Structure formats: C-alpha cells, structure tokens
Image: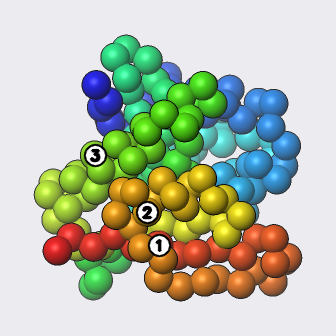
Amino acid sequence: MINVELIKPEDCQYIVDWNKDKDEDFLFQWAGLKAYSYPITLEQVGKRINMEGISIYKIIEGDEIIGTVELNSLNTEELSIKVSRFLIKKDKRGKGYGKQILEIVADKVFHEMNFKKLTLNVYKFNIGAIKCYEKAGFIVDTLNQNLRSPKWDSYVMILENK
C-alpha cells in the first residue's frame, strides 16, 4: 500500500542519495533552475522543506520511502496548485506507482485542500512521464518553448476536479 506524508528533516537524505550519481542535466530536468543547485546537498533540501508555500511529501510503500513529490505555486484565485519535483526511486519506476501516487495527491488536493485544478510541467522528451500523467487523467494544456534550448521545451499539463 502506498501512502503520502509530509517529509521530515530526517528524510531529506533520501533526496540527496537519489541524485548522488546523476549529472547536472538530471537535476535540471527534475528540479528546474531555482529549487536546487548542482550538486544537490542536504542543506539545500533542508532549507526547501521549510519554505513557505512549498509542501514536500514522502512516498511510502510499507515502511520504505520510495519517492517524493512537491506541491507549490498555490493560486487562490484559480484554486490551483502545482505538482513538481516528483521523483520515484529508480528500482520502483515503470511499475505503475506514478499513476497511483498522482491519484493520491489529486485526492488530497481536491478533497482535503479544496483546490479545483492540479498542474505540472513536463519536458517534451520525457515520454514515460507524459504517459504516466495521462494515465492519471492529466491533459496537455500548453507548450512552453525554452529559450535556453529546444531540448528543454515543456508541456503544462492539467487535471481538473470535475
């Protein structure tokens, strides 16, 4: 059974470890330009979990932390919130966890937090993630062209509570 709970300071090392053998492009793909700088450190993650307007959740299967997901960019006028920095431990990928986790997050956002829209950004080349998000009910809304390089063009995807 999968559960999603707010991350605690003692859990931050998992995020650092999952990024340890990755390059700068991986960190940029996962975290963007503003959240963390390369190489990611425990201090950076510790600061981020205490930032206002950001909620980082640990994803738990049994007693094992298998990933994290962040909610941020609250828009009280549109009643929307953004999913970002969604990371599943490498040996758990491709097994259907992503869809299940997004459904849990959507339930939390729509029914506990009373938001009406969940958004996320995904790079066009990340076909596996796009398929996962579509399986969870997200649809492509817009294309963001990246001035840095067309490689980093991304889609905004949305899921609305009907």
Which amino acid, mark 3? Ile
56, 22: nearer the viewer: 22
Which label sits on residue 9? none
User: Label 3, on which residue?
Assistant: 104
**Label 2 Cα neighbours within 10 Å, binned few <14 / some 14-19 / many ≥20:** some
Q: Earlier in the sequence, mark 1 or mark 2?
A: 2
Q: Residue at x 30, y 50 (%)?
A: 103
Q: Is residue 53 above or below residue 22?
A: below
Q: Secondary structure at mark 1?
A: strand
Quadrant in the picture for residue 160: bottom left
Which amino acid, mark 1? Met
Discs 3, 2 touching: Cβ within 8 Å: no
The colour scheme applied to this rendered structure is rainbow
In the rendered image, the quadrant that contains the C terminus is bottom left
92, 113: nearer the viewer: 92
User: Label 1, on which residue?
Assistant: 157
Quadrant in the picture for residue 116: bottom left
Q: Is residue 57 above or below residue 140?
A: above
**In-image side of 52 versus 131 (left or right):** left
Image x and y of residue 52, in percent: 42, 57
User: Label 2, on which residue?
Assistant: 134
Quadrant in the picture for residue 98: top left
In the rendered image, the quadrant that contains the N terminus is top left
* Residue 79 visible (yes or no): yes
Discs 1, 2 touching: Cβ within 8 Å: yes
Q: Secondary structure at mark 2?
A: helix
